[in-house]
Image (cartoon, rainbow, N blue to C red):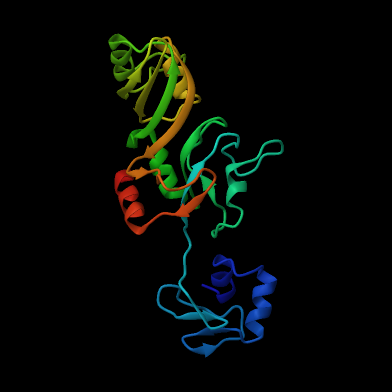
Amino acid sequence: MRLDKFLCDMQLGTRSQIRESVRKGLVSVNGVPVKSPDHKVDEKRDSVTYMGEALTYQCFYYYMLHKPAGVVTATRDRREPTVMGLMSDARGKDLFPVGRLDKDTEGLLLVTNDGELAHRLLAPRKHVEKMYYVECTGVLTADGIASLESGVDIGDEERTLPAKVRLVSQTENAYVMELAITEGRFHQVKRMVQTVGGSVTYLKRLSMGTLTLDAGLPKGSYRPLTEKELLDLRSCAD
């Protein structure tokens, strides 16, 4: 790998800024100053320092974002604030959200630039489970739970795959449940609730596969995944 590409991937400046820094002797490889931007480095073995700081090469980045309501799940939008706008200072090139949450939906969102992992997590054949906390109007009957757990007709060509339902609480005209699904169709949870005579008033994603929303992460904030979180997430997508 060219030295300037290595440094660009580490987001240490623009290509022209990095080339200038190299020519000034601010970069060393294996303890030796290198002034040629096209010098070849082995990103896995060579020791690279920039202004005395040792660099560990990282190509892929993985973040947990606690999405608030009011922002759209997109990398850019001309009219609406986006989830990526909340992460303008995050390291990593070409970051994107894995899957989508509706504008009024809160909760866990995985953000990365690892396209292969994202594809595996979203592939229907993988059946990676997404858990939601759902507040609804209406009454959820035993028959309604059975319908959701066997798959319902939401107007698409095929019925939804079987879901898992845990009724948390219920009053005369409202209820709270946790709903786990393995698909990601358009407005799927809201449409599923409608089939059993209810209407969603609040929706929050709690988990995706093995990755669970950090209870201490404020809305609108993000953090890198821990090594264990990433290993577990990769395992569930294999």
Q: As rendered, which of 118 and 229 lies closer to the eye?
A: 229
Q: How many marks?
A: 0
234 or 106: nearer the eye?
A: 106
Using the rendered image of the protein, determine whether residue 119 is visible from the camera's viewpoint: yes
Q: Where on the picture, by quarter, is residue 189?
A: top left
Vertical relation: 69 (above or below) 174: below
Q: Is residue 78 above or below residue 87?
A: above
Q: In x, y percent, where is residue 7?
A: 57, 72
Residue 9: x percent and y percent?
Answer: 55, 65
Q: Nearer the viewer, residue 45 or 128?
A: 128
Which residue does the image show at 33% across and 12% down from the upper left? 144
The correct choice, above or below, for 230 with respect to 82 in the image is: below
**In the rendered image of this protein, does residue 191 appear above or below residue 205?**
above
Q: Position of residue 160 (x, y in %)?
A: 38, 20
Left or right? Give the position of 121 relative to 15: left
- Residue at position x 60%, y 37% in the image: 71
Residue 157 appears in the picture as rendered: no
Q: Position of residue 55 (x, y in %)?
A: 49, 75
Q: Quadrant of residue 180?
A: top left
Residue 6: quadrant of the picture:
bottom right
Outermost residue on the bottom side: it is 32
User: From the viewer's perspective, is 126 left or right of 98?
Assistant: left
- Residue found at x 59% / y 48%: 86
Q: Relative to 7, is 114 on the left or the right?
A: left
**Residue farthest to the front?**
171
